[in-house]
Image: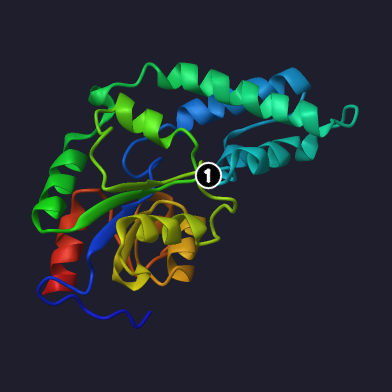
Amino acid sequence: MGHPAVTGTGPYEAVVFDLDGVICFTDVYHYRGWKSIADELGIPFDETINNRLRGVSRMESLEIVLERYEGEPLSDARKEELAATKNERYRVMLGDMSPADLDPSVRTTLDELRGRGLKLAIGSSSKNATFILERIGLGDYFDAISDGTNITRSKPDPEVFLKAAEFLGVEPERCVVVEDAVAGIEAGEAAGMYTVAIGDAADQGAGDAQIGTFAELADVLSRLDG
């Protein structure tokens, strides 16, 4: 990718994290929410379809769910209603989340990165990012949150990450992105950021670096600094 190696305190000054699948895991709640909508409309819905919704905005997710819909045409107002209903059900399920749902290694790693002087931000398509962070005990933890409430384009468009850099006051090329979706890695690359893949994205060999666990991120950044 041609990214410069970190020496001393730079050039990387910040780390921007996707939320779901990186900091925490709410996929099962998304799945249950969308499946409830699909079932009511008589639409087949399974994990394969659900995987296509990762990192995608709520309305775009609905359009994917509706690809196999064979009923009467739905008005825009009805689509908005369906998306809102899914989100209401999803938020009810999120209400059961607590700090116990946060892997201890995530907080330990975040503390280590902050101790090195790095700024930390969230870059997520979710409109529920702040709510989720509050539920898992990280409500005031990040220096900036760029999410579905302040963007108009979903990943792989780089907007959410560029906004995070703007909110942090850090140049994009001085940011590292941590993502679990290939579309998110593509967004980070389009933003000109160094990309670290975890989960599905790492399994597919995406990104400038790949990690198997969140705790490995500290070592990756140390090597870059080396």
> Is 198 located above or below residue 62 in the figure?
below
**Color encoding of the figure:** rainbow
Left/right placement of residue 115 relative to residue 142 reads left
Quadrant of the snapshot with the N terminus:
bottom left
Q: Nearer the viewer, residue 179 or 84?
A: 84
Residue highlighted by disc 1: 54
Quadrant of the snapshot with the C terminus:
bottom left
What is the x, y in percent for residue 180?
Answer: 40, 51
**How many numbered circles does the render carry?**
1
Q: Can residue 118 be seen by looking at this rendering?
A: yes
> Is 93 located above or below residue 105 in the figure?
above
Q: Nearer the viewer, residue 157 or 171?
A: 171
Q: Residue at x 36, y 68 (%)?
A: 172
Q: Nearer the viewer, residue 155 or 51?
A: 155
Q: Nearer the viewer, residue 226 or 199?
A: 226
Q: Residue at x 78, y 29 (%)?
A: 77
Left/right placement of residue 153 relative to residue 206 reads right
What is the x, y in percent for residue 61?
Answer: 64, 40
Q: Residue at x 12, y 70 (%)?
A: 9
Q: Secondary structure at mark 1?
A: loop
What is the x, y in percent for residue 75?
Answer: 84, 31
Q: Can residue 35 be seen by looking at this rendering?
A: no
Q: Residue at x 53, y 50 (%)?
A: 151
Q: Quadrant of residue 44?
A: top right
Q: Amino acid at mark 1?
A: Arg
What is the x, y in percent for residue 20?
Answer: 41, 40
Kindly give the residue lying farthest to the right in the view shown.
72
Mark 1 residue crowding within 10 angstroms, few (<14) / some (14–19) / many (20+): many
